[in-house]
Image (tube, rainbow, N blue to C red):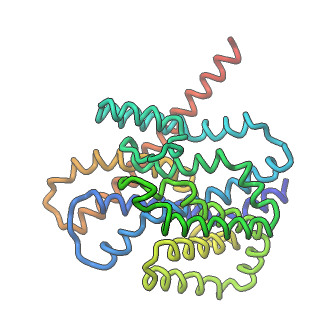
């Protein structure tokens, strides 16, 4: 038991990475939907590109799933029913409420059909899976396809050599998608490449590959802590500022962050605040645009400076999404307990 706790404790830095990703995506979406113009590199370049953090969730998801289920899958210690039941029960109740609210808010036949498709959690298997109902849920759709493929994913990372080869092939497919398969001869104009599992596969493979080398990475980061910190920050800045290519930038930066985060604990990443936000990061991500629609109506006519309005909106949306997430999760938990007790005494 102590060994298990120590192993899990190594990766508490991931709390900080999840929290940063969730808040960063909120900042980007508020910027894109607030409808105000602000000059400056920070607002128009840095915050604009924070939407890429959705792909960081994929890296984290793959690594975390390997930590929790890789050995169980490989040693047949968990049934197929239990595995997928846990995935659905983790996601569906909260997502169901948001989808219902969004469908009711803008009811039409289109939103009704999209809502039904979304609730299967398999909507990324559609030829063109762009959804107007909880539009940000495209990330969830891709991650759920990864869950569907997770036993196969375990095979792909079952040995270090196979993990390296699989990562190379995933990278090759990512490049081929960009250069060949996602042109006008193969997809429609409105096709969203980000919601395609073949395009996103490299980000999941990064998480799996790092999982296979987690011990070596941990030891290296621990031994050369100062160098790794400076190197991670420096290379992140270089890749972000001087590299324009989306793939090189995201794959490089997220690989650096993942390797650094599975090293020894850092207070800036592993603390009570980061852990609290991390625990509801998925819920914040899914609900923040619903909260934004309400918040934006309240501050739209305020006669305040653009920067102040943006900061105020981000703070309220993050706090509101966090509040909604906590309240709904508690309600869902109580309903679940009630149903279990009712079934027990029936």
Q: In the displayed structure, does residue 141 sit left or right of residue 40? A: right
Q: Is residue 197 visible?
A: yes
Q: In the displayed structure, does residue 47 sit left or right of residue 118? A: left
| Above or below 133: residue 265 | below
Give the camera-side residue of 231 and 201: 201
| Above or below 262: residue 153 | above
- Numbered-mark total: 0
Choose top left, top right, bottom left or bottom right for residue 213. Answer: bottom right
Give the camera-side residue of 300 and 274: 300
Q: x, y (%) of residue 311?
A: 30, 64
Q: x, y (%) of residue 295?
A: 28, 49
Residue at the (67%, 35%) spot, across then down: 85
Residue at the (50%, 41%) spot, across then down: 123
- Quadrant in which the C terminus appears: top right
Give the camera-side residue of 322 and 203: 203
Give the camera-side residue of 338 and 88: 88
Q: In the displayed structure, does residue 286 sit left or right of residue 203? A: left
Q: x, y (%) of residue 102?
A: 36, 37
Q: Is residue 21 visible?
A: no
Most distant residue in the front direction: 185
Residue at the (46%, 82%) spot, across then down: 243
Q: In the displayed structure, does residue 136 sit left or right of residue 313? A: right
Residue at the (58%, 46%) spot, across then down: 144
| Above or below 267: residue 85 | above
| Above or below 269: residue 151 | above
């Amino acid at each position: 038991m102590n060994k298990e706790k120590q192993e899990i404790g190594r990766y508490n830095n991931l709390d900080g990475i999840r929290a940063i990703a969730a808040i960063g995506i909120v900042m980007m979406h508020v910027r894109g939907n607030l409808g105000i113009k602000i000059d400056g590199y920070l607002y128009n370049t840095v915050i604009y590109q924070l939407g890429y953090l959705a792909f960081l969730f994929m890296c984290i998801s793959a690594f975390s799933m390997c930590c929790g289920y890789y050995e169980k899958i490989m040693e047949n210690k968990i049934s197929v029913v239990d595995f997928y039941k846990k995935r659905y029960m983790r996601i569906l109740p909260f997502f169901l409420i948001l989808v219902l609210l969004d469908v009711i808010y803008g009811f039409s036949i289109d939103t009704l059909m999209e809502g039904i498709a979304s609730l299967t959690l398999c909507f990324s298997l559609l030829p063109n899976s762009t959804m107007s109902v909880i539009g940000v849920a495209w990330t969830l759709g891709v991650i759920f396809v990864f869950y569907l493929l997770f036993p196969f994913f375990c095979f792909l990372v079952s040995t270090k050599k196979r993990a390296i080869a699989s990562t190379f092939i995933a990278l090759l497919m990512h490049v081929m998608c960009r250069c060949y398969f996602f042109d006008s001869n193969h997809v429609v104009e409105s096709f969203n490449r980000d919601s395609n599992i073949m395009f996103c596969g490299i980000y999941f493979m990064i998480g799996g590959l790092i999982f296979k080398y987690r011990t070596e990475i941990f030891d290296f980061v621990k031994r050369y802590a100062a160098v790794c910190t400076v190197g991670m920050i420096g290379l992140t800045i270089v890749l972000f500022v001087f590299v324009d290519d989306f793939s090189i930038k995201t794959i490089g930066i997220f690989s650096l962050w993942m390797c650094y985060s599975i090293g020894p604990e850092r207070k800036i990443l592993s603390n009570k605040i980061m852990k609290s936000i991390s625990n509801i990061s998925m819920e914040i991500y899914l609900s923040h645009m619903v909260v934004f629609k309400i918040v934006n109506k309240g501050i739209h006519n305020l006669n305040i400076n653009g920067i102040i309005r943006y900061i105020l909106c981000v703070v309220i949306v993050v706090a509101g999404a966090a509040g909604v997430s906590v309240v709904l999760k508690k309600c869902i938990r109580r309903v679940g307990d009630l149903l279990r007790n009712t079934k027990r005494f029936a």
